[in-house]
Amino acid sequence: MSINLFRAAVAAAGIAFLAQPAPAQNPKDLLDRAKGEQSILVQKLEDEMRRALEDAKRLEGVSKARAVNSLRAALLKLDDPLVPPTFRAEWSGRLNAQIKAIDAGQRVADPLVTTDPAKAAIREANEKRARAAKEEYGEVRRSIDTITALIKSGNSTQAQKEAEALAKRFPDNPAVILLAENAGMNQRLADARILIEQQKQGYVLAMRSIERSAIPPKDDIEFDVKRFQEITKLRIKPMLTKKEQSILKALESSVNLGYKEAAFEEVITAISTSMGQPILLDKQALQSAMIDTSTPTTVTLRGVTARTALRKVLQDHGLTYIIRDESIQVVTQDTARNTLVTRVYYIGDLVQLNGPFAGVINWGPYLDFMQQQENVNKLIEMIKGIDPLSWQGNGGPGTITYNGLSQAIVVRQTAEVHARLSGSLGR
């Protein structure tokens, strides 16, 4: 099928292709395509030459002039520059010989039948290419109709997919190449329309937000209920079992200790009895700290919490405790560090600037930053007041850092401290 025939098919489908140059093709592909088209032309002309001989044979008994005119009309078709010279010379000779035979009163010979096996194979190949071209034309035409309907219905995404699938099957078909470009342009236009619509909606929402911000407050202070509900979700308390809650409550109880050179196990037992909670001693932890249950321990404390007393006694021997498996367990500092939990707490609402113009630039970016940083430092110091001995710098493993971009603190601590910290942040 020729290129002009494909372009005519596309035009019939009603598709307005963009006037863009077709992508460069491989010269070898173009040469093979030209050879294929030439073979089809040769096959078509050969059929026409045979029909011209048949017509001349039929007409010679009626009118020799009409028989000669039929052969001369066939000769004119051989003047096409695309006809191979060898084919033209062969059939020109045959037709002219028949014309001379008619003029001499001789009978027209029967149409020549190809008996050469090589020519028969060529003819069969030409017929096969012709059938393939016809099938390709039909499939491309049906796909063009489908894609055109999708574009008209506004379904440019599906049209683009259909065009891409067709281009994979027929990558060298000019009509398919132009169709894919047209479908792609329609998809880009559809995306642009969606973007413009989103921009319009965003602008409307921004303007409404500005208008709402200009409404005077009814009271001295107005709180954004929805915003505070979101913040509450960010600071949900860790879920504790009833046993863990009872342990935390027991650690807040007050104890008095007065021991001099007493056995380590005796002091721990006294704290456990005062709390009403068992304290488990890890033998491997004691061996790592190079102590045993009889190691002399001296401690004098009055009116302190059981947590502080236990932490002080253990730290004097290089140990600490953790709450795990609903029990208090004495472990080494390294073990405690490996069981720490990292959590993030949003504190933007707690450290932002106060006053009637809170949250905006009041005294310049630098001074406002310094003021907010001071609020952060104060909050961190308050948090470190929760079990002070559990933080780095005071003998413990816990750490706390502030992230200015997210306005949140990152706390790495024991589950016990996290449970207390969630309550201290007011949620």
Image (tube, rainbow, N blue to C red):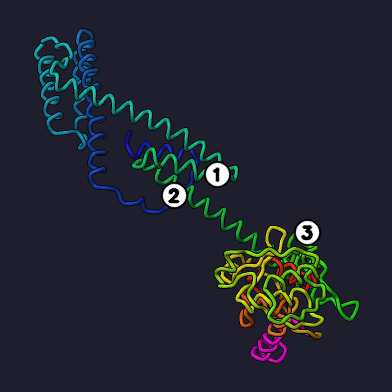
Question: Distance between the Cα atoms at labels 2 and 3?
Answer: 70 Å
Q: Is residue 58 above or below residue 265?
A: above
Q: Position of residue 61 (x, y in %)?
A: 20, 7
Residue 9 forms part of the magenta stretch: no
Q: Position of residue 303 (x, y in %)?
A: 82, 81
Mark 3, mark 1: which one is toward the viewer?
Answer: 3
Image point (45%, 51%), residue name: 18
Amino acid bearing label 3: Lys
Q: Are marks 2 and 3 in contact (CB under 8 Å)?
A: no
Label 3: element kind = helix
Question: What range of the chain is rendered magenta?
Answer: 358-376
Quarter the N terminus occupies = top left
Q: Using a 10 Å C-alpha cutoff, classify the residue at mark 1 as few (fewer than 14 neighbours), some (14 to 19) or many (20 or more).
A: some
Amino acid bearing label 1: Ile
Image point (21%, 21%), residue name: 49
Q: Is residue 279 above or below residue 145?
A: below
- Please tell me the numbered disc located at residue 243: 3
Amino acid bearing label 2: Glu
Question: Distance between the Cα atoms at labels 3 and 1?
Answer: 67 Å
Label 2: element kind = helix
Residue 185 or residue 324, whichever sits in front: 324
Mark 2, mark 3: which one is toward the viewer?
Answer: 3
Nearest to N terminus: mark 2 or mark 3: 2
Q: Position of residue 337 (x, y in %)?
A: 59, 69
Question: Distance between the Cα atoms at labels 1 and 2?
Answer: 13 Å
- Give the residue at mark 2: 181
Image point (80%, 79%), residue name: 256
